[in-house]
């Protein structure tokens, strides 16, 4: 098991290196001068030169790439020369020195995602720490709704195959997959947050944290989570219904089910005790993929509901040409994908030990 985990971790690091390289090249070969973007195209040669030196835009592309890797790596090189771009003065917290050399030292630090172009020098890591938990809460709530309802409805549809119940569940599953998220968000906000607001008590827009009207600080508004979580969970719910139904029907046609029936076991007991666990592999694959994509694909839902999460932050950063925030958000999403992929592979190995071979 440890060898299996080691292989997956090495593969994850290789994927992350590829993602970092692609993100860096994508945002550094785009037409336009980032220094002028920060100055809103104003002509000020002296200030442009200071910005280029501060952010390393005056360095060759290869040197910029190496410095970017050095910033992201927890184990990194730091020069003793103050004019060098790898000098520790760039970091708010000085790296912990591990090995000292004449020209600098190798230190241990948290990954550094640079500073925002627009947020008055605010670190990208701090911006992501403020918004990513909100998106994570939204994604977990949406996936919990999708998994619980999807497995239950898929089980019911498989149990009553061909009946009116099966056809109704399959119809709503197909409908859920075909409706775009932005349309569902607008519809849900309009119906339940506006037309029926007096009965539901829900708002059209709102984030996880709201400001107290009496100036006593912020509080958690769980009611604002209901509509965006349901909206974001509609499409994965539809997918999980279809997958769990088809997978259960396939398992129910296996020989061990017929043997269990011959021994006198009831079909509900066979489904609960045997078939459901064997049918979970494709469901886990779909759920993990959808959960990771929610972190990147919740842009429309967050923007329409005013949910202060990572998706809304990406839209705002793109509108303001705040490239470090966009790059940091993309890398954070990629790390999440890799981490979830490793967790899913471990779940596969636990459910089916043959996967380890």
Image (cartoon, grey):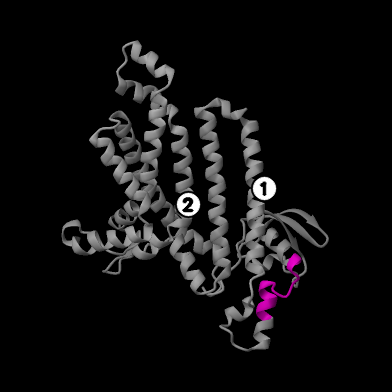
Q: Secondary structure at mark 1?
A: helix
Instruction: Examine the rendering and report whether any part of residue 284 can be seen.
Output: yes
- Quarter of the rendering containing residue 287: top left
The structure residue drawn at horizontal position 38% and vertical position 29%, both measured from the top left corner, is 249
Relative image position of residue 82 (x, y in whole percent): 74, 71
Q: Secondary structure at mark 2?
A: helix
Relative image position of residue 199 (x, y in whole percent): 16, 57
Residue at the left extreme of this rendering: 199
Against 195, residue 14 (above or below) is: above
Residue at the front extreme of this rendering: 162
The numbered dot on residue 43 is none
Local crowd size for mark 2, using a 10 Å CA cut-off: few (<14), some (14–19), many (≥20):
some
Q: Give the side of residue 291 with respect to residue 111, left or right.
A: left
Residue that carries the numbered disc 1 in the rendered image: 14
Q: Give the side of residue 48 with respect to residue 297, left or right.
A: right
The structure residue drawn at horizontal position 41% and vertical position 38%, both measured from the top left corner, is 243
* Residues tagged 1 and 2 counted as in contact (Cβ below 8 A): no
Quadrant that contains the N terminus: top right
Q: Which residues are magenta?
A: 50-63
- Quarter of the rendering containing residue 79: bottom right
Sequence-first tag of 1 and 2: 1
Local crowd size for mark 1, using a 10 Å CA cut-off: few (<14), some (14–19), many (≥20):
few
Instruction: Examine the rendering and report whether any part of residue 74 can be seen.
Output: no
Relative image position of residue 239 (x, y in whole percent): 39, 44
Residue that carries the numbered disc 2 in the rendered image: 293
Could you tell me what secondary structure mostly forms the magenta stretch? helix
Q: Give the side of residue 148 with respect to residue 165, left or right.
A: right
- Name the mark nearer the viewer: 1 or 2: 2
């Amino acid at each position: 098991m440890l060898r299996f985990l080691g292989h997956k971790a090495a593969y994850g690091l290789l994927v992350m290196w590829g993602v970092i390289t692609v993100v860096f090249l994508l945002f550094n070969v785009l037409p336009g001068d980032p220094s002028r973007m920060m100055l809103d195209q104003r002509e000020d040669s002296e200030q442009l030169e200071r910005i280029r030196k501060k952010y390393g835009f005056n360095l060759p592309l290869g040197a910029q790439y190496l410095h970017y890797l050095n910033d992201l790596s927890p184990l990194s090189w730091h020069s003793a020369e103050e004019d060098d771009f790898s000098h520790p003065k760039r970091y708010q917290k000085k790296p912990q020195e591990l090995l000292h050399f004449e020209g600098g030292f190798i230190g241990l630090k948290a990954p550094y995602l640079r500073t925002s172009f627009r947020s008055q020098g605010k670190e990208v890591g701090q911006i992501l720490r403020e918004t990513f938990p909100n998106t994570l809460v939204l994604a977990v709530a949406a996936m919990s709704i999708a998994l619980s309802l999807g497995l239950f409805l898929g089980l019911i549809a498989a149990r009553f195959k061909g009946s009116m119940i099966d056809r109704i569940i399959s119809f709503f599953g197909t409908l859920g997959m075909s409706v775009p998220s932005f349309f569902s968000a607008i519809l849900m906000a309009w119906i339940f947050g506006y037309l029926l607001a007096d009965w539901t008590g829900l708002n059209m827009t709102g984030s996880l944290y709201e400001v107290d009207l009496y100036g006593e600080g912020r509080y958690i508004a769980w009611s604002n989570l209901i509509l965006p979580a349901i909206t974001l969970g509609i499409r994965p719910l539809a997918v999980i219904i279809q997958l769990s139904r088809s997978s259960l029907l396939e398992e129910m046609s296996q020989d061990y089910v017929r043997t269990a029936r011959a021994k006198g076991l009831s079909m509900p007991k066979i489904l609960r005790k045997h078939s459901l666990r064997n049918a979970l592999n494709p469901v886990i694959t779909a759920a993990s993929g959808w959960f990771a994509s929610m972190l990147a694909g919740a842009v429309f839902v967050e923007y329409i509901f005013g949910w202060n999460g990572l998706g809304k932050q990406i839209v705002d950063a793109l509108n303001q040409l705040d490239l470090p925030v966009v790059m940091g958000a993309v890398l954070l999403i990629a790390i999440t994908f890799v981490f979830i992929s490793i967790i899913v592979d471990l779940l596969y190995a636990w459910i089916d030990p043959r996967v380890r071979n």
